[in-house]
Image (cartoon, rainbow, N blue to C red):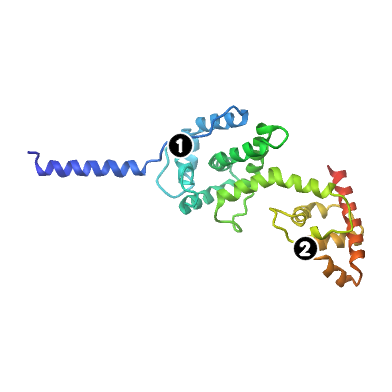
């Protein structure tokens, strides 16, 4: 018979082994493919994973959990290969994004964290955009890098990964289309589409709002400036007509002129 002490030691050894294995970071599967950018990013990550300088720097950040020995551990803790609604991973990722505001290594880690969904976006968008997947992934990754560095921590402290991915797609594909539409839509007497809320991702008013900083650098007639300010504020044409004591047709004509001036400024700046 096996002595009882031996049995207990064996049980403890088994339990310790099971506990250790559950705490270990699983082997993560990184993207692959023929795209030069994706291939370069993955090769770069492979080189970085065990770089001692990078590991020392990450361990100096005071992130939750034990010291890391491999950068894949940081990815896993920040939600990579974990359920989408994992709040613990989301908050870990937020700590990385806070660092990324002025740290290239943190930005690179966050980029790797969201790379799979960025690739999925580029694959989907590349089928319908000139330049195909390669151009789409370059645009998506480039915009993602900027968005990571400028992420609004205070306003959006949750669902960080999904916010970054969604914003990257919008910035890379939707925003450019919206601005183009604003510049090319035929003029008419009806500009209600600029003032009313829509069910689309971003309407023309939102596009104008994003141009606010540029508008402030351009010169407009006083009336056109007033009309653009009304559009930026989402003021309806009816309310504007009441405020100025004029007809809807007059307000539409003023907005018509303001948009012509806006297009001229944008075309000169392009």
Question: Toward the viewer: 10 or 122?
Answer: 122
Question: Toward the viewer: 251 or 54?
Answer: 251
The residue labelled by disc 2 is: 234
Q: Secondary structure at mark 2?
A: loop
Q: Quadrant of the N terminus?
A: top left
Find residue 153 and report its horizontal and vertical position in percent.
59, 55
The residue labelled by disc 1 is: 28
Give the residue drawn at x 73%, y 34%.
Answer: 130
Find residue 12 and report its horizontal and vertical position in percent.
21, 44
Q: Of the two numbered discs 1 and 2 on the same chain, state the one appearing first in sequence.
A: 1
Give the residue drawn at x 46%, y 33%.
Answer: 50
What is the spatial separation of the Cα atoms under label 1 and label 2, in whole angstroms? 47 Å
Find residue 184 and report its horizontal and vertical position in percent.
84, 46
Answer with the quarter of the image where residue 110 lies.
top right
Answer with the quarter of the image where residue 28 lies.
top left
Find residue 216 and report its horizontal and vertical position in percent.
82, 55
- Mark 1: few, some, or many residues within 10 Å (few <14, many ≥20)? few
Q: Quadrant of the C terminus?
A: top right
Is residue 120 in view from this perspective?
Answer: yes
Answer with the quarter of the image where residue 205 lies.
bottom right
Left or right: where 38 falls relative to 189: left
């Amino acid at each position: 018979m096996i002595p009882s002490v031996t049995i207990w030691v064996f049980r403890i050894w088994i339990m310790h082994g099971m506990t250790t294995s559950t705490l270990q970071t699983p082997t993560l599967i990184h993207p692959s493919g023929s795209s030069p950018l994706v291939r370069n990013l993955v090769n770069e990550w492979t080189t970085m994973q065990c770089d001692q300088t990078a590991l020392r720097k990450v361990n100096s950040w005071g992130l939750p959990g034990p010291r890391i020995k491999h950068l894949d551990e940081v990815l896993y803790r920040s939600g990579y290969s974990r359920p989408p609604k994992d709040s613990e991973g989301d908050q870990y990722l937020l700590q990385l994004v806070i660092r990324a505001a002025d740290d290239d290594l943190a930005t690179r880690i966050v980029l790797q964290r969201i790379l799979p969904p960025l690739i999925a976006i580029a694959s989907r968008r590349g089928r319908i955009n000139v330049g195909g997947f390669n151009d789409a992934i370059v645009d998506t990754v480039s915009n993602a890098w900027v968005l990571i560095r400028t992420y609004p921590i205070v306003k959006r402290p949750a669902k960080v990964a999904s916010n970054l991915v969604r914003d990257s797609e919008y910035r890379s594909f939707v925003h450019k289309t919206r601005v183009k539409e604003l510049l090319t839509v035929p003029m008419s007497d009806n500009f209600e589409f600029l003032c009313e809320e829509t069910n689309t991702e971003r309407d023309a008013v939102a596009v104008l709002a994003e141009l606010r900083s540029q508008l402030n650098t351009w010169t407009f007639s006083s009336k056109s400036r007033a009309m653009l300010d009304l559009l930026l504020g989402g003021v309806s044409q009816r309310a504007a007509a009441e405020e100025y004591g004029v007809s809807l047709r007059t307000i539409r004509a003023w907005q018509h002129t303001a948009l012509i001036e806006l297009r001229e400024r944008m075309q000169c700046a392009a």
